[in-house]
């Protein structure tokens, strides 16, 4: 058995978690919207066509903000096609996913769905095939009270009150050649700046995120952020980051080490953003919007495959089935996000339903939780408060993470990976939540947590997520194969907490003042 020690002090915090850290993402992609959140005719659908079985799982998952409508889809989207009488809306070819978009669900339905779910809407504007004019019209349609063409059109469509959408993404992955009308950093920086200016002139209360790189593995990574922010620094609050972890190499230790690359990614983007601020001698701090993150590799598609399939409506694509090992890597990503609460102020799990998602459905049938559902639901429920600085003493291992999309190297070394990855969040009632990932596949870790300045604590809940088979999955027939179960033997002596973590496990412990 390995031993590990964690030390923290209630007064030494990294930062408070912003409620928007626990967001997710709905794109017009595959069966995320159609057959996912929206399926008129489904036995559980309400009068608006919203599946209530999915809604119940969404509420249990606990996302706080929802990004929409893309993703790659947004770079070819005419938002006007998705508003007004449904029967008059045009069907269009979607060149992002080689599907036919029926447009029977659009911005107003999305905002209604968010209201029903108690989630803040986040909208992305099309800066691919369109630019500032369409973006400012959408802000006017959504947020202006009335008395103008676009705001009165919203009223005519049945939405009297403004939607008051606060968080806006200036396009999506505009550095990627797969994107409709992708751009150089200069081209994008100029378009994003002009769009931002006009959008904010219409509604000064909005917050704006510029596109960062589509991933740390992009050839233009770093230079892209620097130049985009050089253009947009005065006009945006956030820069975006995207990460999808993979296990193409079938190397579980490397997969579990790879969330640490996400830590590097965040630190690097913070450094670049602060470098742009330094050139201006500015105290402004650009915050990070990690608006796509997940594990995703099995169901990636190339354009030539998509073309062969014709132009289906809501095809079952990107329906990644997550196993136990994915849930562990996903938990590591949750810890990385929490531990950067000072700068990552918004994050969106990509995506919500069916498409690389924590929730799966059968069209016309049931809905169930994938393995990755659990760490997210626990993080959203228990991750509210002050994330504490932790000092972790743990044995380490070295891994080499294979990324076939890497710009320079196919392998990223992850040296000195601690077997134990931890986040500690102090709540406002004097309690503490611990998120613990044991990355050792073979050995238990006996962990001692020294929680200073907490006084006497008691364990309120302790759950572990593990399975003897790292390939175990949940399915409609066996939806509970992988789910948290109580962890026995957690002890507290004053502020000293002891637990034994099983090999390859994710554990969450909640403590309250005794
Ligand atoms: O989330 C799936 C896709 O991944 C998104 O559409 C795109 O932004 C990213 O490449």
Image (cartoon, rainbow, N blue to C red):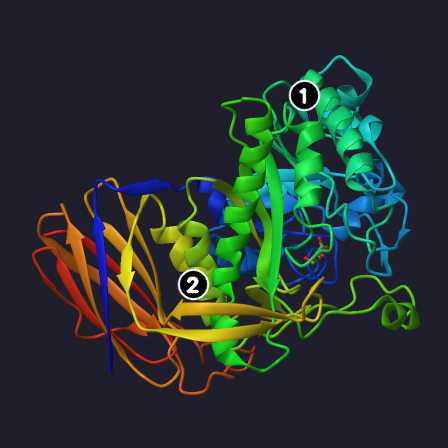
Q: Quadrant of residue 365?
A: bottom right
Q: Which residue sits furthest top? A: 147
Q: Residues within 10 Å of mark 2 (few under 14, many from 20)?
A: many
On screen, residue 153 versus residue 450, left or right, reads right
Q: Position of residue 247 (x, y in %)?
A: 59, 75
Residue of label 1: 200
- Residue at 65 percent across and 46 percent down: it is 222
- Residue at 44 percent across and 41 percent down: it is 19
- What number is the disc on residue 375? 2
Q: Position of residue 370 (x, y in %)?
A: 52, 70
Rounded to the nearest angstrom, the CA distance separating label 2 from label 1 is 36 Å
Q: Judge whether 343 appears above or below 244 on screen.
A: above
Q: Nearer the viewer, residue 304 or 63?
A: 304
Q: Quadrant of residue 246?
A: bottom right
Q: Helix or strand or loop: what does disc 1 sit on?
A: helix
- Asked whether residue 413 appears in the rendered view, the answer is yes
What quarter of the picture does the N terminus occupy? Answer: bottom left
Q: Judge whether 310 appears above or below 276 on screen.
A: below
On screen, residue 149 versus residue 355, left or right, reads right
Q: Helix or strand or loop: what does disc 2 sit on?
A: helix
On screen, residue 394 versus residue 365, left or right, reads left
Q: Position of residue 429 (x, y in %)?
A: 21, 42
State which tag comes first along the sequence, 2 or 1.
1
Ligand 1 shows up in the quarter that is: bottom right
Mark 1 within 8 Å of ligand 1, using the beta carbon: no
- Asked whether residue 325 appears in the rendered view, the answer is no
Q: Residues within 10 Å of mark 1 (few under 14, many from 20)?
A: some
Q: Position of residue 188 (x, y in %)?
A: 79, 37
- What number is the disc on residue 494? none
């Amino acid at each position: 058995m390995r031993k590990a020690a964690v030390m923290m002090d209630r007064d030494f915090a990294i930062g408070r978690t912003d409620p928007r850290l626990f967001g997710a993402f709905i794109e017009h992609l595959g069966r995320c919207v159609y057959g996912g959140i929206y399926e008129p005719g489904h036995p559980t659908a309400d009068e608006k066509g919203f599946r209530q079985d999915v809604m119940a799982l969404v509420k249990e998952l606990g996302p706080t903000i929802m990004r929409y409508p893309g993703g790659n889809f947004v770079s070819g989207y005419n938002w006007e096609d998705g508003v007004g009488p449904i029967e008059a809306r045009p069907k269009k070819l979607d060149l992002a996913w080689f599907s036919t978009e029926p447009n029977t669900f659009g911005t107003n339905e999305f905002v209604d769905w968010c209201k029903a779910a108690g989630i803040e809407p986040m909208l992305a504007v099309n800066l691919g095939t369109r630019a500032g004019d369409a973006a400012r019209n959408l802000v006017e349609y959504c947020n202006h009270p009335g008395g103008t063409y676009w705001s009165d059109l919203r009223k005519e469509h049945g939405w009297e009150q403004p939607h008051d959408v606060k968080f806006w993404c200036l396009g999506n992955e505009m550095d990627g050649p797969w994107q409709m009308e992708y751009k150089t950093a200069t081209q994008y920086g100029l378009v994003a700046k002009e769009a931002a200016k006009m959008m904010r002139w219409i509604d000064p209360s909005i917050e704006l995120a510029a596109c960062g790189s589509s991933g740390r593995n992009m050839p233009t990574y770093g230079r892209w952020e620097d130049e985009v922010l050089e253009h947009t620094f005065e006009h945006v609050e956030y820069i975006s980051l995207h990460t999808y972890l993979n296990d193409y190499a079938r190397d579980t230790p490397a997969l579990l080490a790879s969330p640490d690359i996400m830590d590097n990614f965040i630190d690097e983007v913070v450094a670049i953003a602060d470098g742009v601020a330094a050139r201006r001698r500015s105290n402004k701090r650009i915050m990070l919007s990690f608006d796509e993150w997940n594990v995703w590799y099995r169901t990636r598609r190339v354009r030539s495959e998509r073309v062969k399939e014709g132009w289906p409506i809501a095809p079952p694509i990107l329906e990644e089935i997550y196993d136990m090992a994915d849930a562990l890597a996903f938990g590591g990503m949750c810890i990385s996000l929490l531990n950067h609460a000072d700068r990552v102020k918004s994050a969106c799990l990509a995506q919500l339903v069916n498409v690389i998602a924590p929730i799966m459905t059968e069209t016309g049938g049931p809905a169930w939780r994938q393995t990755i559902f659990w760490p997210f639901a626990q993080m959203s429920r228990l991750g509210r408060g002050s994330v504490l600085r932790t000092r972790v003493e743990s044995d380490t291992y070295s891994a080499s993470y294979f990324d076939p999309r890497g710009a320079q190297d196919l392998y990223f070394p992850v040296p000195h990976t601690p077997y134990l990855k931890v986040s500690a969040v102090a709540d406002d009632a004097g309690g503490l939540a611990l998120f613990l990932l044991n990355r050792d596949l073979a050995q238990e870790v006996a962990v001692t947590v020294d929680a200073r300045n907490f006084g006497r604590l008691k364990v309120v809940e302790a759950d572990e997520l593990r399975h003897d088979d790292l390939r175990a999955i949940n399915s409609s027939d066996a939806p509970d194969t992988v789910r948290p179960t109580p962890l026995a033997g957690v002890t507290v002596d004053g502020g000293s907490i002891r637990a034994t973590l099983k090999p390859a496990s994710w554990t969450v412990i909640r403590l309250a003042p005794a």
